[in-house]
Image (cartoon, rainbow, N blue to C red):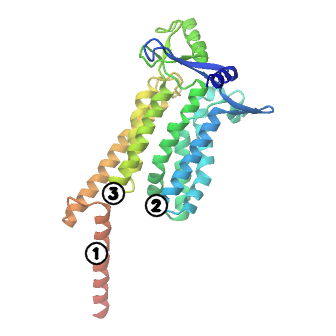
Amino acid sequence: MCNILNSICLMAKGWVEFPKLFGDKGLRIPINDTVFNLGSFEVKWYGLIICLAVVLCIVLGLKACKNHGMTQDDILDYILFAIPSAMVGARLYYVIFQWENYAEEPITALYVWEGGLAVYGGVIAALIALLCVAKYKKQSFIRVAGFAMPYIILGQAIGRWGNFFNQEAFGRYTTLPWGMTGNEIENWVYTQVAKGVEGYSVGTLVHPTFLYESLWCFAAFAFMMIYRKKWEKHEGESLCLYMILYGIERTLVEGLRTDSLYIGNTSVRVSQLLSAVLVIVGVALFADIKRRQKKASYELGEESTGGLEGVVEKMQLDEAAEGDNSAENENQ
């Protein structure tokens, strides 16, 4: 084991440390943002982790789709368009709100290997792709999007660990026991000290905001899967839960981050504002779904067990009654 750790340390270009964990012992982790090289081509941990997350989510989705009225061919059709759209959307979202960095040389907006992706851009673009494919296949977009949401948030939970290897997406200074530092973080702290930014000095620790989001998303994924299995009665509920759960987390954590995208020259963080809107809309839609379920239950006289099944049954009864009336009119 010692030989393995020594090998890792020799290969590592940098390190990340949590000095206050476990009392004064701390935790120091040697890291490298590159997995291996193929000639001049570098395979980065960030890209590898994203790929592994996508593969895992696809496998889970293919396994569960039959229980939600979809075939594996349906899922593959959606994936074929959603993944490339997500990649383009993630980059486009970032470039739009950092246009000053690309205005002089717009071609550099295509240099994705230099970094610059935004989660929200990827999710929005993927949902637009799902909507288009659902329209073409004449399937319910709400059902497809609701089915995908738990896997999307799982992918986000895993993908955030790419930020760990890149030493990015960290927060402002903190004195909490889990405050972190690293070789790249130290360099950033030095720049803040040189600028005279209040709260920063040599040795300042920062919030591991990538970790906050990852843990929250893992917990949200677990909750959404349990909810879907035990309590979900309407196909739009999972979509609302994503909006609420991820929106709450991002609204809070985005305020701690030091690399936020802003609206123009204002102090308004784009993702924080969007997250707050998602929470409000998600709560409103979720409440409306529950209200409709309750109303359907009362109409059927099944207040305690109503829901989507009751709505379907009522529609079938109404259609049958209309059919009987039409037949009587024809006989007359």
Where, quadrant-wise, is the N terminus in this rendering? top right
Under circle 2, the secondary element is: loop
Name the one closer to the observer, 327 or 185. Answer: 185
The percent coordinates of residue 41 (x first, y second) are 77, 33
Residue drawn at (45%, 11%), measured in percent from left and top? 24
Under circle 1, the secondary element is: helix
Q: Which mark is residue 233?
A: 3
Name the one closer to the observer, 112 or 7. Answer: 7
| CA distance for labels 2 and 3 | 15 Å
Residue drawn at (28%, 75%), measured in percent from left and top? 317
Under circle 3, the secondary element is: loop
Most extreme residue toward the right, as rendered?
39
Q: Mark 1 sits on what residue? A: 317
Amino acid on which the number 2 mark rests in the picture: Ser
The percent coordinates of residue 220 (x first, y second) are 41, 40
Sooner in the amino-acid sequence: mark 2 or mark 1: 2
Q: Residues within 10 Å of mark 1 (few under 14, many from 20)?
A: few
Sooner in the amino-acid sequence: mark 1 or mark 3: 3
| CA distance for labels 1 and 3 | 20 Å
Q: From this view, report whether residue 297 is shown above or below residue 191.
A: below
| CA distance for labels 2 and 1 | 23 Å
Amino acid on which the number 3 mark rests in the picture: Lys
Q: Say which quarter of the image contains residue 67.
A: bottom left
Q: Mark 2 sits on what residue? A: 140
Q: From this view, report whether residue 243 is shown above or below residue 232.
A: above
